[in-house]
Protein backbone atom coordinates (compact mmCIF):
# COMPACT_ATOMS: atom_id res chain seq x y z
CA UNK A 1 0.00 0.00 0.00
CA UNK A 2 1.30 3.42 -0.91
CA UNK A 3 1.95 5.93 1.83
CA UNK A 4 -0.88 8.57 1.69
CA UNK A 5 1.36 11.17 3.38
CA UNK A 6 4.07 10.72 0.71
CA UNK A 7 1.41 11.12 -1.98
CA UNK A 8 0.21 14.40 -0.48
CA UNK A 9 3.81 15.70 -0.31
CA UNK A 10 4.30 14.88 -4.02
CA UNK A 11 1.10 16.74 -4.93
CA UNK A 12 2.22 19.73 -2.85
CA UNK A 13 5.68 19.76 -4.45
CA UNK A 14 4.06 19.62 -7.90
CA UNK A 15 1.85 22.60 -6.98
CA UNK A 16 4.83 24.75 -5.86
CA UNK A 17 6.78 23.72 -8.97
CA UNK A 18 3.88 24.86 -11.15
CA UNK A 19 3.65 28.22 -9.34
CA UNK A 20 7.41 28.78 -9.66
CA UNK A 21 7.21 27.92 -13.37
CA UNK A 22 4.49 30.54 -13.90
CA UNK A 23 6.51 33.22 -12.09
CA UNK A 24 9.72 32.25 -13.86
CA UNK A 25 8.20 33.35 -17.17
CA UNK A 26 8.52 36.96 -15.98
CA UNK A 27 12.24 36.71 -15.10
CA UNK A 28 15.25 37.10 -17.29
CA UNK A 29 18.25 34.84 -16.73
CA UNK A 30 20.65 37.74 -16.26
CA UNK A 31 18.27 40.43 -15.06
CA UNK A 32 19.75 43.89 -14.62
CA UNK A 33 18.02 44.04 -11.25
CA UNK A 34 20.58 41.59 -9.90
CA UNK A 35 22.99 44.55 -9.84
CA UNK A 36 20.55 47.11 -8.42
CA UNK A 37 21.44 48.41 -4.93
CA UNK A 38 19.65 46.69 -2.06
CA UNK A 39 18.01 49.40 0.06
CA UNK A 40 16.53 49.24 3.55
CA UNK A 41 14.33 52.22 4.54
CA UNK A 42 14.52 52.72 8.31
CA UNK A 43 11.58 54.95 9.19
CA UNK A 44 9.45 54.52 12.31
CA UNK A 45 6.84 57.14 11.35
CA UNK A 46 6.32 56.30 7.67
CA UNK A 47 3.00 54.80 6.67
CA UNK A 48 2.79 51.61 4.59
CA UNK A 49 1.30 53.70 1.77
CA UNK A 50 4.42 55.90 1.70
CA UNK A 51 6.75 52.93 1.30
CA UNK A 52 4.47 51.40 -1.31
CA UNK A 53 4.64 54.68 -3.27
CA UNK A 54 8.44 54.54 -3.27
CA UNK A 55 8.45 50.96 -4.53
CA UNK A 56 6.06 51.82 -7.34
CA UNK A 57 7.96 54.91 -8.46
CA UNK A 58 11.52 53.51 -8.20
CA UNK A 59 11.52 50.13 -9.97
CA UNK A 60 15.32 50.21 -10.45
CA UNK A 61 16.09 49.56 -6.76
CA UNK A 62 15.84 46.39 -4.71
CA UNK A 63 13.94 47.28 -1.53
CA UNK A 64 14.74 44.77 1.18
CA UNK A 65 13.03 44.26 4.52
CA UNK A 66 16.10 43.69 6.68
CA UNK A 67 19.15 45.84 7.35
CA UNK A 68 21.44 42.80 7.45
CA UNK A 69 20.94 42.17 3.75
CA UNK A 70 21.04 45.83 2.62
CA UNK A 71 23.82 47.67 0.82
CA UNK A 72 22.32 51.04 1.74
CA UNK A 73 20.38 51.88 4.89
CA UNK A 74 18.32 55.07 4.75
CA UNK A 75 17.67 56.34 8.27
CA UNK A 76 14.69 58.74 8.20
CA UNK A 77 14.08 61.14 11.08
CA UNK A 78 11.56 63.93 11.55
CA UNK A 79 11.25 67.15 13.56
CA UNK A 80 8.48 69.75 13.63
CA UNK A 81 9.36 72.98 11.87
CA UNK A 82 8.17 76.56 12.17
CA UNK A 83 5.79 76.30 9.22
CA UNK A 84 3.59 73.75 10.94
CA UNK A 85 5.11 70.99 8.87
CA UNK A 86 8.22 68.87 9.33
CA UNK A 87 11.94 68.95 8.69
CA UNK A 88 12.79 65.47 7.40
CA UNK A 89 16.34 64.14 7.34
CA UNK A 90 17.57 61.29 5.15
CA UNK A 91 20.79 59.71 6.44
CA UNK A 92 22.19 57.49 3.69
CA UNK A 93 24.50 54.87 5.24
CA UNK A 94 26.60 52.72 2.94
CA UNK A 95 26.97 49.05 3.86
CA UNK A 96 28.87 46.11 2.37
CA UNK A 97 29.94 47.20 -1.18
CA UNK A 98 29.24 50.84 -0.29
CA UNK A 99 30.75 50.81 3.21
CA UNK A 100 31.89 54.30 4.22
CA UNK A 101 29.88 55.99 1.47
CA UNK A 102 27.50 58.11 3.55
CA UNK A 103 25.44 61.23 2.96
CA UNK A 104 22.74 63.40 4.57
CA UNK A 105 19.92 65.30 2.88
CA UNK A 106 17.31 67.50 4.59
CA UNK A 107 14.05 68.87 3.22
CA UNK A 108 11.05 70.64 4.73
CA UNK A 109 7.29 70.37 4.36
CA UNK A 110 4.58 72.84 5.35
CA UNK A 111 1.19 72.46 7.00
CA UNK A 112 -0.44 73.24 3.65
CA UNK A 113 1.17 70.32 1.82
CA UNK A 114 -1.08 67.39 0.99
CA UNK A 115 0.02 63.82 1.71
CA UNK A 116 0.73 63.29 -1.97
CA UNK A 117 2.83 66.46 -2.21
CA UNK A 118 4.87 65.31 0.79
CA UNK A 119 5.36 61.86 -0.75
CA UNK A 120 6.51 63.35 -4.05
CA UNK A 121 8.95 65.71 -2.36
CA UNK A 122 10.26 62.87 -0.21
CA UNK A 123 10.65 60.72 -3.33
CA UNK A 124 12.61 63.49 -5.06
CA UNK A 125 15.16 63.80 -2.25
CA UNK A 126 15.36 60.04 -1.83
CA UNK A 127 16.29 59.58 -5.49
CA UNK A 128 18.84 62.41 -5.26
CA UNK A 129 20.53 60.68 -2.34
CA UNK A 130 20.52 57.26 -4.00
CA UNK A 131 22.13 58.46 -7.25
CA UNK A 132 25.69 58.19 -5.91
CA UNK A 133 25.07 54.50 -5.19
CA UNK A 134 23.18 53.73 -8.40
CA UNK A 135 25.96 55.40 -10.43
CA UNK A 136 28.38 52.73 -9.16
CA UNK A 137 26.30 49.87 -10.61
CA UNK A 138 25.35 48.84 -14.17
CA UNK A 139 21.86 50.20 -13.47
CA UNK A 140 23.29 53.74 -13.57
CA UNK A 141 24.15 53.34 -17.25
CA UNK A 142 20.47 52.89 -18.08
CA UNK A 143 19.15 55.96 -16.26
CA UNK A 144 18.42 59.25 -17.98
CA UNK A 145 18.53 62.48 -15.92
CA UNK A 146 16.30 65.39 -16.96
CA UNK A 147 15.52 68.80 -15.43
CA UNK A 148 12.85 71.47 -15.91
CA UNK A 149 14.85 73.97 -13.84
CA UNK A 150 15.05 77.49 -15.26
CA UNK A 151 17.37 80.28 -14.18
CA UNK A 152 15.80 82.94 -11.91
CA UNK A 153 17.07 85.85 -9.84
CA UNK A 154 13.87 86.35 -7.85
CA UNK A 155 14.11 86.47 -4.07
CA UNK A 156 11.67 84.58 -1.89
CA UNK A 157 9.52 87.04 0.09
CA UNK A 158 7.57 85.99 3.16
CA UNK A 159 4.73 88.41 3.84
CA UNK A 160 3.99 86.57 7.10
CA UNK A 161 7.55 87.06 8.42
CA UNK A 162 7.79 83.41 9.58
CA UNK A 163 4.51 83.55 11.54
CA UNK A 164 2.21 80.52 11.23
CA UNK A 165 -1.37 80.43 12.52
CA UNK A 166 -3.58 77.39 12.98
CA UNK A 167 -7.16 76.93 14.11
CA UNK A 168 -9.01 73.70 14.90
CA UNK A 169 -12.69 73.14 15.59
CA UNK A 170 -14.40 69.78 15.74
CA UNK A 171 -17.33 68.03 17.36
CA UNK A 172 -18.17 64.40 17.97
CA UNK A 173 -21.71 63.27 18.63
CA UNK A 174 -22.99 59.76 19.28
CA UNK A 175 -25.93 58.08 20.92
CA UNK A 176 -28.39 55.27 21.28
CA UNK A 177 -31.65 54.86 23.13
CA UNK A 178 -30.19 55.22 26.63
CA UNK A 179 -26.81 56.95 26.04
CA UNK A 180 -26.08 60.28 24.37
CA UNK A 181 -22.66 61.92 24.13
CA UNK A 182 -21.23 65.08 22.68
CA UNK A 183 -17.61 66.16 22.67
CA UNK A 184 -16.38 69.48 21.31
CA UNK A 185 -12.90 70.87 20.99
CA UNK A 186 -11.51 74.13 19.61
CA UNK A 187 -7.96 75.45 19.47
CA UNK A 188 -6.09 78.41 18.06
CA UNK A 189 -2.31 78.51 17.79
CA UNK A 190 0.35 80.94 16.62
CA UNK A 191 4.06 80.26 16.28
CA UNK A 192 7.22 81.79 14.90
CA UNK A 193 10.36 79.70 14.61
CA UNK A 194 13.72 80.95 13.34
CA UNK A 195 17.26 79.69 14.00
CA UNK A 196 17.61 82.32 16.73
CA UNK A 197 14.14 82.34 18.31
CA UNK A 198 11.24 80.02 18.96
CA UNK A 199 7.79 81.23 20.02
CA UNK A 200 4.78 78.92 20.44
CA UNK A 201 1.32 79.78 21.72
CA UNK A 202 -2.00 77.99 21.86
CA UNK A 203 -5.40 78.37 23.49
CA UNK A 204 -7.96 75.57 23.55
CA UNK A 205 -11.37 74.78 24.98
CA UNK A 206 -12.70 71.25 25.54
CA UNK A 207 -16.26 70.25 26.44
CA UNK A 208 -17.46 66.67 27.11
CA UNK A 209 -20.97 65.67 28.11
CA UNK A 210 -22.62 62.25 28.37
CA UNK A 211 -26.18 61.42 29.43
CA UNK A 212 -27.19 57.98 30.69
CA UNK A 213 -30.85 56.97 31.08
CA UNK A 214 -31.37 54.15 33.58
CA UNK A 215 -35.11 53.58 34.03
CA UNK A 216 -36.54 56.86 35.30
CA UNK A 217 -33.09 58.12 36.34
CA UNK A 218 -30.89 60.32 34.17
CA UNK A 219 -27.18 60.62 35.00
CA UNK A 220 -25.12 63.40 33.43
CA UNK A 221 -21.31 63.25 33.19
CA UNK A 222 -19.87 66.68 32.42
CA UNK A 223 -16.28 67.90 32.16
CA UNK A 224 -14.80 70.94 30.48
CA UNK A 225 -11.42 72.63 30.48
CA UNK A 226 -9.68 75.69 29.06
CA UNK A 227 -5.93 76.04 28.52
CA UNK A 228 -3.52 78.78 27.43
CA UNK A 229 0.14 77.93 26.80
CA UNK A 230 3.05 80.18 25.83
CA UNK A 231 6.65 79.19 25.16
CA UNK A 232 9.58 81.33 24.03
CA UNK A 233 13.17 80.20 23.57
CA UNK A 234 16.35 82.11 22.61
CA UNK A 235 19.15 80.13 20.97
CA UNK A 236 22.40 81.14 22.69
CA UNK A 237 24.80 78.78 20.90
CA UNK A 238 25.06 75.16 19.70
CA UNK A 239 24.52 73.85 23.24
CA UNK A 240 22.69 76.49 25.32
CA UNK A 241 19.14 77.88 25.14
CA UNK A 242 17.18 80.14 27.50
CA UNK A 243 13.54 81.12 27.67
CA UNK A 244 10.36 80.73 29.61
CA UNK A 245 7.03 78.96 29.92
CA UNK A 246 3.68 80.52 30.84
CA UNK A 247 0.41 78.62 31.26
CA UNK A 248 -3.13 79.30 32.44
CA UNK A 249 -5.96 76.79 32.72
CA UNK A 250 -9.18 75.73 34.40
CA UNK A 251 -10.55 72.21 34.81
CA UNK A 252 -13.56 70.67 36.53
CA UNK A 253 -11.81 67.29 36.58
CA UNK A 254 -8.83 68.74 38.50
CA UNK A 255 -10.91 71.03 40.77
CA UNK A 256 -9.19 74.09 39.24
CA UNK A 257 -11.24 77.26 38.95
CA UNK A 258 -8.29 79.20 37.59
CA UNK A 259 -4.56 78.57 37.65
CA UNK A 260 -1.57 80.23 36.05
CA UNK A 261 2.19 79.85 36.22
CA UNK A 262 5.31 81.62 34.93
CA UNK A 263 8.53 79.60 34.71
CA UNK A 264 11.85 80.96 33.40
CA UNK A 265 13.96 78.09 32.02
CA UNK A 266 17.40 77.22 30.68
CA UNK A 267 18.49 74.17 28.65
CA UNK A 268 21.84 72.57 27.87
CA UNK A 269 22.28 69.96 25.15
CA UNK A 270 25.38 67.75 25.48
CA UNK A 271 25.38 67.27 21.69
CA UNK A 272 25.18 70.21 19.26
CA UNK A 273 21.61 71.09 18.29
CA UNK A 274 22.60 70.59 14.65
CA UNK A 275 22.77 66.84 15.41
CA UNK A 276 19.36 66.73 17.09
CA UNK A 277 17.72 64.52 14.45
CA UNK A 278 20.15 61.70 15.33
CA UNK A 279 21.02 62.26 18.99
CA UNK A 280 20.09 64.50 21.91
CA UNK A 281 20.96 64.64 25.58
CA UNK A 282 19.20 67.69 27.02
CA UNK A 283 19.09 69.03 30.57
CA UNK A 284 16.21 71.47 31.17
CA UNK A 285 15.86 73.45 34.40
CA UNK A 286 12.90 75.69 35.23
CA UNK A 287 11.70 77.49 38.37
CA UNK A 288 8.97 80.02 39.02
CA UNK A 289 5.61 81.05 40.41
CA UNK A 290 2.16 79.43 40.32
CA UNK A 291 -1.24 80.65 41.55
CA UNK A 292 -4.17 78.26 42.09
CA UNK A 293 -7.83 79.04 42.73
CA UNK A 294 -9.99 75.99 43.44
CA UNK A 295 -13.64 75.21 42.72
CA UNK A 296 -14.06 73.40 46.07
CA UNK A 297 -12.03 73.51 49.27
CA UNK A 298 -9.06 71.16 48.99
CA UNK A 299 -7.89 68.48 51.40
CA UNK A 300 -5.46 71.10 52.71
CA UNK A 301 -8.35 73.54 53.43
CA UNK A 302 -7.35 75.88 50.61
CA UNK A 303 -9.46 77.85 48.15
CA UNK A 304 -6.51 79.93 46.89
CA UNK A 305 -2.78 79.63 47.20
CA UNK A 306 0.45 81.07 45.79
CA UNK A 307 3.28 78.63 45.17
CA UNK A 308 6.93 78.52 44.14
CA UNK A 309 8.25 75.43 42.38
CA UNK A 310 11.15 74.09 40.36
CA UNK A 311 11.81 71.17 38.06
CA UNK A 312 14.70 69.55 36.23
CA UNK A 313 14.41 67.21 33.28
CA UNK A 314 17.02 65.05 31.57
CA UNK A 315 16.01 63.69 28.16
CA UNK A 316 17.98 61.48 25.77
CA UNK A 317 17.09 60.50 22.20
CA UNK A 318 19.23 58.35 19.92
CA UNK A 319 18.45 57.11 16.43
CA UNK A 320 21.04 54.69 15.02
CA UNK A 321 21.26 51.80 12.58
CA UNK A 322 20.60 49.29 15.38
CA UNK A 323 17.33 50.99 16.40
CA UNK A 324 16.24 53.92 18.53
CA UNK A 325 16.18 54.92 22.19
CA UNK A 326 14.23 57.63 24.00
CA UNK A 327 14.49 58.19 27.73
CA UNK A 328 13.57 60.99 30.10
CA UNK A 329 13.43 61.60 33.84
CA UNK A 330 11.91 64.69 35.46
CA UNK A 331 11.84 65.78 39.07
CA UNK A 332 9.45 68.47 40.37
CA UNK A 333 8.68 69.91 43.81
CA UNK A 334 7.12 72.89 45.60
CA UNK A 335 9.43 75.02 47.73
CA UNK A 336 6.97 75.46 50.62
CA UNK A 337 6.95 71.69 51.24
CA UNK A 338 9.58 69.47 49.62
CA UNK A 339 7.40 66.40 50.28
CA UNK A 340 4.98 67.75 47.66
CA UNK A 341 6.86 66.44 44.64
CA UNK A 342 6.60 64.32 41.52
CA UNK A 343 9.12 62.08 39.76
CA UNK A 344 8.42 61.02 36.17
CA UNK A 345 10.25 58.39 34.09
CA UNK A 346 9.57 57.74 30.42
CA UNK A 347 11.23 55.48 27.87
CA UNK A 348 10.80 53.78 24.52
CA UNK A 349 13.26 51.40 22.85
CA UNK A 350 13.32 49.71 19.46
CA UNK A 351 16.09 47.16 18.86
CA UNK A 352 17.10 45.06 15.86
CA UNK A 353 18.74 42.07 17.51
CA UNK A 354 19.44 39.91 14.46
CA UNK A 355 18.22 39.34 10.93
CA UNK A 356 14.45 39.69 10.73
CA UNK A 357 13.95 40.05 14.50
CA UNK A 358 13.15 43.29 16.30
CA UNK A 359 12.06 44.12 19.84
CA UNK A 360 10.16 47.19 21.05
CA UNK A 361 9.18 48.17 24.56
CA UNK A 362 8.56 51.27 26.63
CA UNK A 363 6.31 53.08 29.02
CA UNK A 364 6.26 55.71 31.72
CA UNK A 365 5.96 55.85 35.48
CA UNK A 366 4.98 58.75 37.73
CA UNK A 367 5.55 58.82 41.48
CA UNK A 368 2.95 61.36 42.60
CA UNK A 369 3.02 63.37 45.83
CA UNK A 370 1.87 66.81 44.61
CA UNK A 371 -1.93 66.58 44.30
CA UNK A 372 -2.73 69.89 46.01
CA UNK A 373 -6.09 70.36 44.27
CA UNK A 374 -7.91 67.24 45.53
CA UNK A 375 -11.32 68.33 46.93
CA UNK A 376 -11.97 67.93 50.65
CA UNK A 377 -15.32 66.24 50.03
CA UNK A 378 -13.67 63.53 47.94
CA UNK A 379 -15.23 61.84 44.92
CA UNK A 380 -18.62 60.17 44.78
CA UNK A 381 -19.16 56.72 43.32
CA UNK A 382 -20.67 58.40 40.27
CA UNK A 383 -17.59 60.62 39.88
CA UNK A 384 -15.33 57.57 40.06
CA UNK A 385 -17.29 55.46 37.57
CA UNK A 386 -17.74 58.33 35.11
CA UNK A 387 -14.19 59.70 35.61
CA UNK A 388 -15.42 63.17 36.48
CA UNK A 389 -12.94 63.82 39.30
CA UNK A 390 -9.24 63.37 39.80
CA UNK A 391 -8.57 60.62 42.35
CA UNK A 392 -5.86 60.43 44.97
CA UNK A 393 -2.95 58.21 43.95
CA UNK A 394 0.75 57.86 44.66
CA UNK A 395 1.68 56.45 41.28
CA UNK A 396 0.54 56.10 37.70
CA UNK A 397 2.04 53.96 34.95
CA UNK A 398 1.57 52.56 31.46
CA UNK A 399 3.73 50.20 29.44
CA UNK A 400 3.96 48.32 26.17
CA UNK A 401 6.15 45.59 24.66
CA UNK A 402 6.24 43.65 21.43
CA UNK A 403 8.37 41.51 19.12
CA UNK A 404 8.46 41.22 15.36
CA UNK A 405 10.02 38.45 13.31
CA UNK A 406 9.89 38.05 9.56
CA UNK A 407 11.58 35.50 7.31
CA UNK A 408 11.56 34.43 3.72
CA UNK A 409 12.60 36.37 0.62
CA UNK A 410 14.74 39.41 1.42
CA UNK A 411 13.29 41.37 -1.51
CA UNK A 412 10.04 43.30 -1.28
CA UNK A 413 10.14 45.63 -4.28
CA UNK A 414 7.27 44.07 -6.21
CA UNK A 415 3.91 45.85 -5.94
CA UNK A 416 0.68 44.00 -6.78
CA UNK A 417 -2.46 45.72 -5.43
CA UNK A 418 -4.96 43.24 -6.94
CA UNK A 419 -7.66 42.04 -4.54
CA UNK A 420 -6.44 44.65 -2.03
CA UNK A 421 -3.59 44.01 0.42
Image: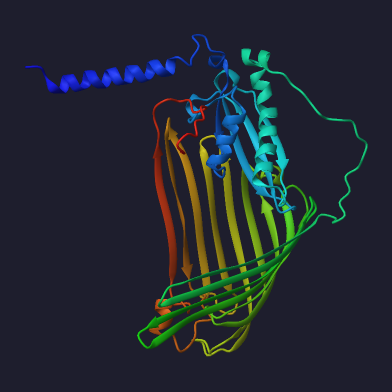
Residue drawn where x is 80% and y is 53% of the image = 196
Q: Of all residues shown, which one is farthest toward the left?
A: 1
Asked if one can make out residue 270 in the rendered structure from this viewpoint, the answer is no
Asked if residue 371 lies left or right of residue 60, the reply is: left
Residue drawn where x is 68% and y is 57% of the image = 267
Measuring from the top left, give residue 74's x and y in whole percent. 59, 32
Measuring from the top left, give residue 219's x and y in whole percent. 43, 84
Q: Nearer the viewer, residue 54 or 27?
A: 27
Asked if residue 419 lies left or right of residue 200, the reply is: left
Q: Nearer the viewer, residue 224 or 332?
A: 224
Measuring from the top left, give residue 92's x and y in whole percent. 63, 30
233 relative to 41, above or below: below
The N terminus: image quadrant? top left
Q: Of all residues shown, which one is farthest toward the right?
A: 153
Q: How many marks?
A: 0
Measuring from the top left, give residue 159's x and y in whole percent. 87, 54
Q: Nearer the viewer, residue 41 or 324?
A: 41
In the rendered view, how is the structure colored?
Answer: rainbow
131 relative to 320, above or below: above
Asked if one can make out residue 136 in the rendered structure from this viewpoint, the answer is yes
Residue drawn where x is 45% and y is 14% of the image = 25
280 relative to 393, above or below: above
Quadrant of the rendered image containing residue 246: bottom right
Residue drawn where x is 59% and y is 59% of the image = 313
Amino acid sequence: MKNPRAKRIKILMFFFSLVNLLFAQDKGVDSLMNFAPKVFIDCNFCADEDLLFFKQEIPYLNFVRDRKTAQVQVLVTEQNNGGGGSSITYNFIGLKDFLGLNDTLVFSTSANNTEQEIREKGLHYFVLGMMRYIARTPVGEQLKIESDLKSTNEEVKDRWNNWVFETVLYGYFSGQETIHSRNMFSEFGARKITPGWKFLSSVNVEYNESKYSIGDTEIIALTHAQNLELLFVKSLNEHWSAGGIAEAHSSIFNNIKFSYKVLPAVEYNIFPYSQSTRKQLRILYSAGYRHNSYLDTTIYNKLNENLLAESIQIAAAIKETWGSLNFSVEGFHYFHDFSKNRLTFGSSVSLRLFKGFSLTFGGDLQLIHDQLSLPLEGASQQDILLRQRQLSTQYEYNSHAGINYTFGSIYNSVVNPRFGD
